């Protein structure tokens, strides 16, 4: 029997099942991008995300932007976890959460389709994703 983090082919449909969890972040009433408190927490949040990335927990993440590119503090982070409870614990360790600036709705996400192309240019020392 496979775990929920295994890649499995769904019988008959030939879909690749890759279980991730998505943390949808919503700013609280305490969010104020101009405040020193929020700016400090954002620095800690970025450090936390870098830790999740370096340990292989974070699959990808980023802020939600309005059409005018304004940011209200919302965003999403897709993580690898053994369970929904583990993914929720990851969200609850985020400094934006611990400092009351963001709430998280954590949901399972089954990655089935898509395409990502990675380019590595050795001479110019550049890496790109398309």
Image (cartoon, rainbow, N blue to C red):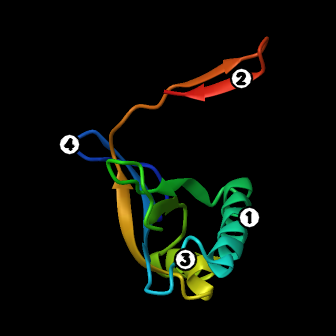
Mark in front: 4 vs 1: 1
- How far apart are labels 4 and 1 at the CA level? 43 Å
First along the sequence among labels 2 and 3: 3
- How far apart are labels 4 and 2 at the CA level? 40 Å
Label 1: few (<14), some or many (≥20) within 10 Å? some
Q: Are marks 1 and 3 in contact (CB under 8 Å)?
A: no
- Residue matched to label 2: 126
Taking the image as shown, residue 17 lies to the left or right of residue 54, namely left
The x, y position of residue 99, in whole percent, is 62, 87
Q: Secondary structure at mark 3?
A: helix
> Vertically, is 107 above or below 92?
above
First along the sequence among labels 2 and 1: 1
In terms of depth relative to the viewer, which is nearer, 52 or 83? 52
- How far apart are labels 1 and 3 at the CA level? 14 Å
- Residue matched to label 3: 91
First along the sequence among labels 4 and 1: 4
First along the sequence among labels 4 and 2: 4
Residue 12 image label: 4
Q: Secondary structure at mark 4?
A: loop
Taking the image as shown, residue 38 lies to the left or right of residue 72, namely right
């Amino acid at each position: 029997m496979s775990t929920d983090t295994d890649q499995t082919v769904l019988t008959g449909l030939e879909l690749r099942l890759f279980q991730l969890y998505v943390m949808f972040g919503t700013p609280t009433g305490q969010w104020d991008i101009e405040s020193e408190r929020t700016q400090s927490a954002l620095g800690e949040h970025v450090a936390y995300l870098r830790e999740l990335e370096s340990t292989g927990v974070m699959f990808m993440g980023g802020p939600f932007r309005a059409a005018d590119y304004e940011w209200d503090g919302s965003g999403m982070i897709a993580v690898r976890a053994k369970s929904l409870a583990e993914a929720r614990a990851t969200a609850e360790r985020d400094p934006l959460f611990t400092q009351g600036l963001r709430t998280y709705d954590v949901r399972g996400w089954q990655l089935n389709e898509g395409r990502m192309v990675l380019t590595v240019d050795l001479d110019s020392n550049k890496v790109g994703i398309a």
